[in-house]
């Protein structure tokens, strides 16, 4: 057998095995019952919600309102923006005025003194926050009123230091954002669940992270994260290395990814892939197995008579999609547009390959150089 054919066959076999593992990992995640509160449970701790803002994102007002409508006894919400004339300020002030009984503040940070502006905003908000349990949430996240109650209950174990939420991506009207959402809901989550099964949670997911203030202090505070692009991954990694438990929450948030045209979407996804490659090199290399369809097509192109393997790849991929997007996320998008999943897989595979080349990214209109250890520098 020619070496290229043997290599592709091996990759297809590995992808089929991975799909099987993803289905098992999804079942294991769902088998863990969410913590329940009883009459003897300690009172719910007060919570500080930290929300960095930048620009008037699609659906921003609706996103913010869901946090003011939390059914929770004691919480505050802090916002942070670089400049007072940021378009998000008017939206935040409008929402704050609608919910005067919820304690909230807005902080104007000025320009960050280091590359990661989000980390700078979180640092200033943490210094101003009143409570020891903090929930750090991106502006494009939308939730239901029970979010804080679920997260607080998951901290009943005193060894738990960080809780991070799986997310269901919801696109805008853009076709390219729809493909990205399908990839996130069918491919990205499976990688999270498989890693959780084999290694335990040694990372966190950026859109929504809850943490004890003590944990953030023990890992060196936000100063430790200021030069990393994937600060969420590093935060979870450092917390786990310090002996704290990192938990994948039972609560699934909605990640509203907006509606980007093709060029902007490609830049965004390439930035994310290049960041992942430098944050966890071996894990990124292993992503070649996360969906078998592009590999199966390559195998059939090399040896057409092996088409039954491609058919088997479709079956295994469909099983993994059902387990993650269908069973864990309960994602209506994938249920409605399942026939676009092969196209989303092909786009994801090509972007995965592209991220092996180049070491610069564009983030919010600025160009940066990515270093080998996941840090980044402005150009």
Image (spheres, helix red, strand yellow):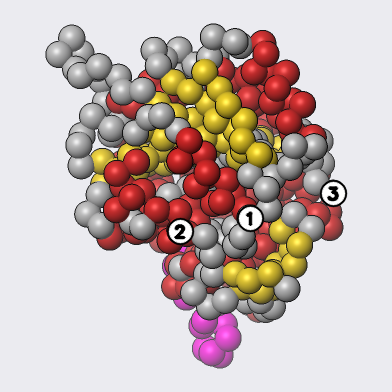
Which residue is more in the foreground, 142 or 319?
Answer: 142
Q: Gap between marks 3 and 1, in whole Å?
A: 28 Å
Q: What residue is drawn where x is 63% and y is 44%?
A: 109
Q: Gap between marks 2 and 3, in whole Å?
A: 35 Å
Q: What residue is drawn where x is 56% and y is 51%?
A: 120
Give whichever of discs 3 and 1 has the lower sequence position. 1
Give whichever of discs 2 and 1 has the lower sequence position. 1
- Location of residue 34 in the rendering, given as x and y in whole percent from the top left corner: 30, 27
Give whichever of discs 2 and 3 has the lower sequence position. 2
Residue under label 3: 261
Q: Which residues are magenta?
A: 1-15
Q: Nearer the viewer, mark 3 or mark 1?
A: 1
Residue under label 1: 112
**Is any atom of residue 247 visible in this view?**
no
Which residue is more in the foreground, 177 or 132?
Answer: 132
**Is any atom of residue 279 visible in this view?**
yes
**Quadrant location of the C terminus?**
bottom right
């Amino acid at each position: 057998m020619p070496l290229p054919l043997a290599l592709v066959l091996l990759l297809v076999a590995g992808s089929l095995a991975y799909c099987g593992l993803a289905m098992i990992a999804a079942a294991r995640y769902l088998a863990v019952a969410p913590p329940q509160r009883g009459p003897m449970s300690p009172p719910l701790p007060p919570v500080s919600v930290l929300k960095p803002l930048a620009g008037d994102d699609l659906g921003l007002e609706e996103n913010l309102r869901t946090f003011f409508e939390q059914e929770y006894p004691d919480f505050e919400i802090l916002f942070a923006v670089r400049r007072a004339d940021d378009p998000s300020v008017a939206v935040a002030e409008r929402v704050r005025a609608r919910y005067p009984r919820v304690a909230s503040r807005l902080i104007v940070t000025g320009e960050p003194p280091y590359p990661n502006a989000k980390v700078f905003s979180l640092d200033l908000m943490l210094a101003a926050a009143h409570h020891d349990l903090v929930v750090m949430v991106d502006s494009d996240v939308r939730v239901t009123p029970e979010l804080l109650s679920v997260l607080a209950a998951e901290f009943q174990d005193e060894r738990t230091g960080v809780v991070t939420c799986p997310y269901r991506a919801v696109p805008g009207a853009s076709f390219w954002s729809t493909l990205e959402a399908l990839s996130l809901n069918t491919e990205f989550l499976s990688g999270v669940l498989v890693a959780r099964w084999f290694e335990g949670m040694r990372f966190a997911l950026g859109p929504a992270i809850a943490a004890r203030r003590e944990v953030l202090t023990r890992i060196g505070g936000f100063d430790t994260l200021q030069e990393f692009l994937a600060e969420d991954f590093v935060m979870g990694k450092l917390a786990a290395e310090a002996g704290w438990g990192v938990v994948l929450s039972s609560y699934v948030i909605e990640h509203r990814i907006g509606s980007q045209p093709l060029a902007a979407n490609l830049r965004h996804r390439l930035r994310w892939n290049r960041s992942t490659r430098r944050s966890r090199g071996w894990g990124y290399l292993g992503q070649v197995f996360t969906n078998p369809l592009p590999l199966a097509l390559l195998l059939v192109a090399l040896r057409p008579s092996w088409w039954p393997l491609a058919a088997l790849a479709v079956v295994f991929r469909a099983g993994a999609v059902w387990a993650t997007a269908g069973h864990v996320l309960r994602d209506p998008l994938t249920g409605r547009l399942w026939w676009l999943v092969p196209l989303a897989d092909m786009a994801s595979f090509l972007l995965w390959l592209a991220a092996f080349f180049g070491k610069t990214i564009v983030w919010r209109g600025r160009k940066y150089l990515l270093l080998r250890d996941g840090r980044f520098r402005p150009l």
